[in-house]
Image (tube, helix red, strand yellow):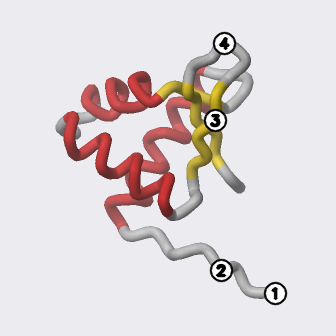
Amino acid sequence: MRNSRTPLGPSEREILEHLEAYVDANSDDESLTRETAVTYLMERDFGRVEARDRIEQLLLKERVIEYVSRFGRPDYCFKS
């Protein structure tokens, strides 16, 4: 069966790689909040609007899943 997910463009792949690197370096549960993700991307010279837009694209393409954590905050995890 073919993978039916929409392919990522170069800029989306770059954002996903940055977020995966953050999770690999900082978390045991492979999750992070939206604001943490935006802040991390801003530290890598992405603007706030661009970071939010790129995260939204990853959500729409089902590469990142948003869920409410047991602490009641929205977190992300990566879909393999």
| Residue 11 drawn at (x, y percent) | 32, 60
Q: CA distance from mark 4 to mark 1?
A: 37 Å
Question: Badge 3 is on which residue?
Answer: 67
**Distance between the Cα atoms at labels 2 and 4?**
33 Å
The local crowd at label 3, few if under 14, some if 14 to 19, many if 20 or more residues have their Cα within 10 Å, is: some
In x, y percent, where is residue 5?
60, 74
Residue drawn 48% across the image and 60% down it: 60
Residue at (74, 86) in percent of width and height? 2
Q: What residue does disc 1 label? A: 1
The answer to whether the residue labelled 2 contacts the one labelled 1, judged by CB atoms less than 8 Å apart, is no
Q: Quadrant of residue 42?
A: top left
Image quadrant in which you'd find residue 43: top left
Distance from Cα at disc 3 to Cα at disc 4: 11 Å
Question: Amino acid type of disc 1?
Answer: Met
What residue is shown at x 36% (from left), y 66% (from top)? 10
Question: Mark 1: which secondary structure?
Answer: loop
For this view, does 5 lie left or right of residue 42?
right
Q: Which numbered tag is attached to residue 4?
A: 2
Task: Name the residue carrying label 4.
Answer: 71
Circles 2 and 3, Cβ within 8 Å, touching? The answer is no
**4 or 1: tag closer to the N-terminus:** 1
**Residue type beneath disc 3:** Tyr
- If you read the primary sequence from the N terminus, does the residue marked by circle 2 or circle 4 appear first? 2
In this view, the residue farthest toward the top is: 71
